[in-house]
Amino acid sequence: GTVNGASSFQFRALRVGTDTTLAQIIRMVEEAQGAKLPIQGIVDRITLWFVPAVMVLAVVTVLTWLLLGPSPALSYALVAGVSVLIIACPCAMGLATPTSIMVGTGRAAEMGVLFRKGDALQELTSVDVVALDKTGTLTEGRPELTDLVLADGFDRPEMLALVAAVEAQSEHPIADAVVRAATAEGAARHDVEAFESITGLGVRAKVAGHDVLVGADRLMTREGLDIASLADAERRIAEQGRTALFAAVDGKVAAVIGVADPVKPASTAAIRALHDLGLKVAMITGDKAETANAIAREIGIDHVFAGVLPDGKVAALDTLKGNHQRIAFVGDGINDAPALAHADVGIAIGTGTDVAIESADVVLMSGDLRGVVNAFQVSARSMRNIRQNLFWAFGYNVALIPVAAGVLYPSFGLLLSPVLAAGAMAFSSVFVLTNALRLRWVRPAMSEAETPVVTESAAPVPTPVAAE
């Protein structure tokens, strides 16, 4: 999309051909459109018995006319028998599901919702709870340093420099927030040795001859460090909906760090829209319960799983499933991949990691939760459209097969011509196709420029769930 004017430049294409984003989108949509939903299996089983039954019915019709029909009996028998075979052709039944899938998934792609697996189109309609990862999904994923409360004897510039030196080696969004703050304040830079990332807990390293440890309170407890002097400061930070971390230097707790990750503008409206659809919403986070509950109250979360380590998200989903509920999980990070694969329906934020996208059933091209609402809407509309098609296809056959067989002839002298039977059969297929094409006009429930109109209601009190 770039136009080069008077100068020249060199560029490197990192992805070409089938590896480009556009090619991947096309491939995902084609695979979804060619999928066979569970409801199609029911249609196949019915058709398996329907066709032989129609053949038998056609033979019975011919024999009945030959034995009981007026003269010329053979002509009436052939007309009725052929009409039964034509009118009962299960074309509309075969078209009912795949046409709606093709149109529905195509329209969803236009709305930024990519169904990687076609059966997710049906599975979404049976979901009871939408579980959300917090960082990067509910929130912007770009936190900012808000607090640095020091223990006695420690200096802010030097403390910020030590912590930033360690965090500069980490790829976590919180680490990036600390480094940006240190850079903005002109903190000194130190070399780092023996850096170690402790999954789900924090980081440690040697900085300027000091042993520096940065992480959650559970990391300090594991290392046998006393956090009592800064416990009140940590609690106040957490109650404000901020993530609180401790920093320790040479075996002594030196500071508590507060980091705020703002909630995405669309998250609150999207959660209200999910509630309007009759869905419960859960949040899974590694933050402390105080922080998680503050965010949950702000945006209307029903259930909170706090203090969850990266490998504990699957266990959190199992807890929700234990109530015989079907779960959709929404995430964006590498550590979300197991939960995305484990959920009944995994929904990946398209701005997230490739691993998360490959593990998901549905991919949202937008970076927020509006796409989740649109995915549920397309799913519900598509499944309703499929049921309408199937009702018409089966109802048409049930109603017109007796007419084709000649049930109206004794009372009204009416016998359906094979030509009219062929026209009626074609009309049923045209009706199914036309009905499926109505999905082309499905509007996004939530677009970039608008949010759904919802009734004012009190935000539900979140239900905290202890992490296993």
Image (cartoon, rainbow, N blue to C red):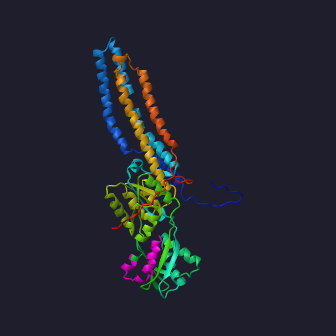
Q: Is residue 179 above or below residue 141?
A: below
Q: Nearer the viewer, residue 296 or 251?
A: 296
Residue at 47%, 32% in the rendered image = 430
The x, y position of residue 304, in whole percent, is 39, 64
Residue at 51%, 79% in the rendered image = 148
Q: Nearer the viewer, residue 299 or 143?
A: 299
Q: Quadrant of the N terminus?
A: bottom right
The image quadrant of residue 449 is bottom right
Q: Is residue 151 above or below residue 92?
A: below
Q: Nearer the viewer, residue 28 or 261?
A: 261
Q: Residue furthest bottom?
A: 153
Q: Is residue 223 visible?
A: yes
The image quadrant of residue 288 is bottom left
Q: Residue furthest left?
A: 67
Callout count: 0
The x, y position of residue 21, in whole percent, is 52, 54
The x, y position of residue 33, in whole percent, is 45, 45
Q: Is residue 63 above or below residue 279?
A: above
Residues in magenta? 218-247
Task: Assess whether residue 257 is covered by the magenta stretch.
Answer: no
Q: Residue furthest right?
A: 6
Q: Is residue 31 visible?
A: no
Q: Quadrant of the C terminus?
A: bottom left
Q: Residue furthest top?
A: 71
Residue at 47%, 64% in the rendered image = 298
The x, y position of residue 16, in whole percent, is 54, 55
Residue at 43%, 46% in the rendered image = 380
Task: Assess whether residue 242 is covered by the magenta stretch.
Answer: yes
